[in-house]
Amino acid sequence: MSTPLLVQALAVLSAPALAGAAVLGVRLRRVAARAARRETGLSERVAELEERCAELERTASCDPVTGVWNYRHLQLTLDREIDRARRAEQHEPQDGPRPLAVLLLEINGFDAVVAEHGRVRAGTVLRDLAQRLGMEIRRSDTLGRYSGEEFLVVLPDTGAEGAAQVADRLVWSVRRHLLLDWSSGERADRRPHGNGLTAAIGLAVLPEDGTHAAVLLRSADRALAAARAAGGDCWRPVAPAALSGNVPVAGAAVDSPRPDGVFAAEHDR
C-alpha cells in the first residue's frame, strides 16, 4: 500500500478515537468543575457552621443584660489564669507564680435608677455603664457580671500596685460616667455633680490572698465588705495595712483625669 493511502487509512481509523478522546476530555472537565463547585460549597458551609458555633459560644458566655461576660465564663477564665500562674511557678520556681489580681466591684445607688426609669431602661443604663467599664481595662483582662450589680475583673500579669490603679479608674468611671438620659430637650451635662452612682471594690491578689479560685473570690468579697464599711466610692485590699495609698477616691489623685475626661488603660502594669 502506498504511503498516501496508508495515511488516509490511519486518519479514518483514528478519527473515532480522537472524537472519543475529545468527548472524554469535555466530560472530565465538567466533572472537575462540578467537584470544584462542591468543594467550594462545602468550604463555605463549614465556614458558616464554624461562625455559627462561635456565635453560639459567645452567646452562651455573655450576660444578656449587660453584654459583658457572664458568671460561667468568669469562673472558667479565673481557673485558667490560676493554672497558668501555677505552671509558670513550676517551670521557673525562682520567680514564683505569675502575678494575678481580681477586683470585685459593686455598684451602689442603682435602685434609684430603677425607681426613676423602670427595670427595662435601668437594664440599658447598666449595659451602657458595663461597656464603659470595659474600656478601662486591657484586652487581656476580663470583665464580667458576677451577680446583680456586681462585676468581677480578672487581671492577668498584674500585681497589687497595678490592680490598685485599675480599681482607682473603675471607681472614678462609675461615679463620673454620664448616664443615658431619656428626657426631651437638650441633654444636660451632669458630670460636675456626679450621677448618683458609686462603686465599692474589693481587691485580692494571687498567691497572698488565695491560691484557688474559691479562696481568692472569698478574699475579694471580704475586701469588698471593707470598702462598703468605708462608705463606698473606694476600693480596699484584703489586708488594708499591707498596701499604702488605699483611700476613698473622693480624696485621691484619681479625680484628675485627662483633659478629655477619660482615663487611658494602663498597658505597662
Image: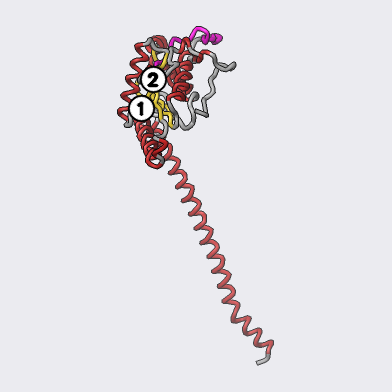
Please state the extent of the stretch shown in magenta in the rendering.
Answer: 185-200
**Does residue 161 appear in the picture of this structure?**
yes
Amino acid at dot 1? Glu
Which one is nearer the viewer's eye here, 161 or 142? 161
Residue at 52% in and 29% down: 268
Q: Earlier in the sequence, mark 2 or mark 1?
A: 1
From what the image shows, is residue 231 above or below residue 123? above
Which one is nearer the viewer's eye here, 173 or 44? 173
Queried whether the magenta region covers residue 186, the answer comes back as: yes
Left or right of residue 269, residue 147 in this image: left
Element under disc 2? helix
Residue at 43% in and 12% down: 248
Queried whether the magenta region covers residue 214, the answer comes back as: no
Q: Which residue is mark 1?
A: 208
Q: Which residue is mark 2?
A: 242
Element under disc 1? loop
Q: Position of residue 152 (x, y in %)?
A: 39, 25
